[in-house]
Amino acid sequence: MKTAVHGKGGIGKSTTSRNTPVASARRGKRVSQTGCDPKHDSTPTLTGSPTPTITDTLQSKDYHYEDARPEDVTHEGYGGVGRVEAGGPPAGAGCGGYAVGETAKSPKESNALHEYDIIPSDVLGDVACGGFASPLNHADYRTTITDNGFDASPATNRTAASVREKARMHPLRSAGPIGNRTLKRDLIDKFVEACPTPVSEAPPPTEHIRVSRVKGKTSSEMVESQPHPNYVCDSHPDTADQALSQPEGIAPKEVSDRESSSSLSDSHSNPIRSEGGGNDQENLLDPAKMIR
Ligand code: ADP
Ligand code: MG
């Protein structure tokens, strides 16, 4: 099962993409996490060190794709999760999208991923065209990471449009957005009202997850390395279970930019005061609620 993960920058795509596979691997699945971002920062927390990129490998083989062996492309990480990083040209040179489009072919040509059950591709931002959309050409599902902020829904809307477009060529479905780093859902719900789609939950803003990134570990590994772990995150295993259930998914129908912007703007200007807070600051997690 191949899933392409998109969403606006900094929303938690890489965090969700690398913690969820660990949970899937613990359920006996063979998973390989593929980073499709030229800055190759998707997989380091699976080993604490950078993964050699496909771009580096191809360069060393003078771009003879046929010479790349599976072990040149996939590297094992924490919990047995495979790590692949597309890489890309140096900053300010070349085209990252082109590099992702080209390197996306390499795992297939070198037969590097055939043994895996689940292959999430963590793609840069919400750029859903050109090479950055190429993982969609191979995917069964698209997932968009979102939050309850004003700027996330236009990105989710755009990615919905790209699924609709790509689904004309092959059976791609949207598994719906995953709400990360949020305790509230009013703006997400507003979007879903206009563009019906199932929504799953990722962790709320969680100090443990922030620190795990800084320490170069997955959230699960960090829990294990604490002598007296006081925090267990259920959200990533829940997200893994939802993916493993192979949801039917939907072919979304995006809303117009004008409709999306005006409904969110109304909602943001007149927030519904729900229990748990009415603005982004109040979304910050009360640590007492997370200690179990
Ligand atoms: P993206 O890949 O979408 O650009 P990242 O996954 O790199 O975003 O996340 C951006 C930052 O937010 C990282 O420092 C990460 O540790 C932090 N982060 C993501 N999700 C959470 C969360 N649920 N709680 C706390 N911090 C988070
Ligand atoms: Mg990322």
Image: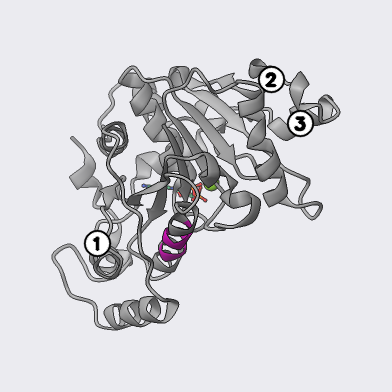
In the image, residue 113 above or below residue 15: above
Residue at which label 3 appears? 56
Disc 3, disc 2: CB below 8 Å?
no
The amino acid marked with disc number 3 is Asp
- Left or right of 228 on screen, residue 257: right
The amino acid marked with disc number 2 is Asp
Discs 2/1, front: 2
Q: Quadrant of the C terminus?
A: top left
Q: Earlier in the sequence, mark 1 or mark 3?
A: 3
Q: Earlier in the sequence, mark 2 or mark 1?
A: 2
Residue at which label 2 appears? 72
Q: Residue furthest front?
A: 169
Going 43% across and 58% down the picture, which residue do you hit? 164
- Residue 31 is marked as none
Going 44% across and 55% down the picture, which residue do you hit? 163
Disc 1, disc 3: CB below 8 Å?
no
Residue 134 position within the rendered picture, expressed as x and y whole percent measured from the top left:
59, 46
SS category of the residue bearing label 2: helix
Residue at which label 1 appears? 185
SS category of the residue bearing label 1: loop
Going 33% across and 20% down the picture, which residue do you hit? 26
Q: Earlier in the sequence, mark 3 or mark 2?
A: 3
**Badge 2, how many Cα within 10 Å: few under 14, some, many 20+?**
some
Residue 63 position within the rendered picture, expressed as x and y whole percent measured from the top left:
82, 31
SS category of the residue bearing label 3: helix
Q: Quadrant of residue 64?
A: top right
Q: Quadrant of residue 37?
A: top right
- Determine if residue 186 is in view: yes
